[in-house]
């Protein structure tokens, strides 16, 4: 495998420039038009059958190379509404208008630019090395992962009516790890995510006469406080669950009690039973606190998005660990499950295919080693930080090689 990868890996300088361009020109979820065009044009230049505008700006490229398994590899494309503070020469200064009409700064604070550039290079490598494998390679460039609805949108748009259904589904993600390293683990990898918009209805009035009103802010504060008891008192000790109130908004003046209070809640879990109980508890607590406050009508509890946990297939991981171990040797490291979430698994479960996602590092080696020595790794910028900036090399080559090794491991190998 090392000989094949070394022989057919393309010159990465052009892909490093693509990475810099993508980093400097990020696009929010649902707005990935230019990023998608860059990926689609590259796939066309290699002779892939290309489908565009899937579930928004999704791109699918198909390379048929004789009889054999169909392997799908995926990269996400969207950026985040974060103001970049890295100080890089190619830092983003972009702003855009979001879906709600608000002007936001935009940054690739989760490394999706790395994912796009590396999958483009991996596609070139695998195309050049097609004498060494047989089967069908599908490259997916997915929109709107940060909103956790891009994969579902592509499926709803008839993805598997246009391309072959995969037998194996693969993805990778850059993380706060030492550059040049990769990690893959079986079972629990990423959490399920559920988000709720809650509106508590009160009765507004003058701030000097609270006895004539029903204060939705007080009720909302009680809800936020009580929600913290779910994990500590209703979830089995040792089981993972997170309940977060990310936003509480109500009123606009010092002396006015408003009519309503809005909360935005986020839930992360692994176990389906725990997930069900936490969600039921949220509804129960919100309704009970509103009733206790004498609210004028029942609260609104609206599920705004939901995605399942990412549970890596054990057999795929076992096979991939062997391949990565042979290729990366000491660069294959251990990692822990993360409380982040993804919608990637839907591309596999929609057709009953096994899947695996692994991680690779983007932290400068000297910076990482120093942080380990001083026990301050937790202080290094992580995904979604305005300071998150993977070093370009050897991060990009590691990602290119990892995806190519993984794809060739599950395609039919030719001697």
Image (spheres, rainbow, N blue to C red):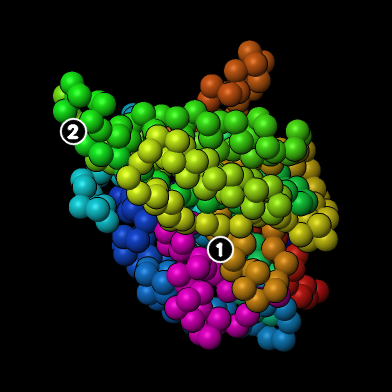
Residues at marks 2 and 1, CA–CA distance in whole angstroms: 53 Å
| Residue occupying image coordinates x 45% and y 78% | 157
Name the foreground residue: 287 vs 73: 287
The residue that disc 2 covers is: 205
Q: Which residues are magenta?
A: 138-167
Label 1 sits on a secondary structure element that is strand
- Nearer-N-terminus badge (2/1): 1
| Residue occupying image coordinates x 41% and y 29% | 221
Q: Can you say which quadrant of the picture contains the N terminus?
A: bottom right
Label 2 sits on a secondary structure element that is strand
Does the stretch in magenta take in 125? no
Name the foreground residue: 360 vs 413: 360
Name the foreground residue: 98 vs 174: 98
**Relative horizontal placement of residue 19, taking residue 215 as reference (left or right):** right
Q: Is residue 409 visible?
A: yes
Q: Position of residue 308 (x, y in %)?
A: 61, 57
Which quarter of the figure has residue 52?
bottom left
**Relative horizontal placement of residue 132, taking residue 228 as reference (left or right):** right
Q: Position of residue 28 (x, y in %)?
A: 34, 53
The residue that disc 1 covers is: 74
> Does residue 33 lie above or below 26 as drawn?
below
């Amino acid at each position: 495998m090392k000989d094949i990868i070394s022989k057919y890996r393309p010159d990465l300088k052009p892909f490093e420039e693509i990475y810099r361009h993508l980093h400097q020109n990020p696009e929010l979820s649902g707005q990935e038009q230019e990023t998608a065009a860059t990926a689609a044009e590259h796939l066309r230049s290699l002779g892939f059958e290309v489908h565009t505008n899937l579930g928004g700006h999704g791109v699918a490229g198909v390379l048929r190379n004789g009889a054999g398994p169909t392997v799908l590899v995926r990269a996400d494309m969207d950026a985040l509404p974060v103001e970049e503070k890295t100080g890089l020469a190619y830092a983003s200064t972009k702003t855009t208008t979001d879906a709600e009409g608000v002007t936001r700064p935009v940054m690739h604070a989760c490394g999706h630019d790395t994912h796009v550039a590396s999958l483009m290079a991996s596609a070139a490598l695998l195309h050049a090395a097609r004498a060494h494998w047989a089967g069908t390679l599908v490259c997916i460039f997915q929109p709107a992962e940060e909103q956790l609805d891009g994969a579902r949108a592509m499926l709803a748009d008839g993805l598997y009516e246009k391309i072959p259904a995969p037998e194996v589904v693969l993805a990778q993600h850059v993380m706060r790890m030492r550059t040049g390293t990769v990690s893959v683990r079986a079972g629990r990898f990423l959490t399920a995510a559920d988000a709720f918009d809650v509106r508590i209805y009160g009765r507004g009035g003058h701030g000097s006469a609270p006895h004539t009103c029903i204060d939705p802010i007080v009720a909302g504060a009680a809800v936020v406080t009580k929600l913290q008891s779910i994990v500590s008192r209703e979830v089995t000790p040792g089981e993972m669950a997170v309940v977060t109130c990310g936003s509480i908004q109500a009123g606009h003046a010092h002396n006015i009690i408003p009519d309503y209070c809005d909360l935005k809640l986020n839930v992360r879990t692994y176990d389906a039973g725990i997930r069900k109980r936490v969600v039921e508890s949220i509804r129960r607590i919100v309704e009970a606190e509103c009733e206790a406050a004498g609210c004028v009508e029942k609260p609104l509890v609206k599920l705004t998005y939901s995605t399942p946990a990412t549970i890596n297939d054990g057999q795929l991981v076992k096979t991939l660990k062997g391949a990565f171990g042979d290729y990366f040797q000491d660069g294959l490291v251990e990692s822990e499950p993360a409380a982040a979430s993804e919608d990637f698994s839907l591309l596999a479960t929609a057709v009953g295919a096994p899947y695996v996602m692994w991680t690779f590092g983007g932290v400068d080696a000297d910076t990482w080693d120093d942080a380990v020595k001083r026990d301050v790794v937790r202080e290094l910028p992580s995904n979604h930080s305005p300071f998150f900036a993977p070093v370009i090399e050897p991060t990009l080559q590691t990602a290119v090689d990892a995806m190519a090794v993984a794809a060739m491991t599950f395609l039919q190998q030719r001697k």
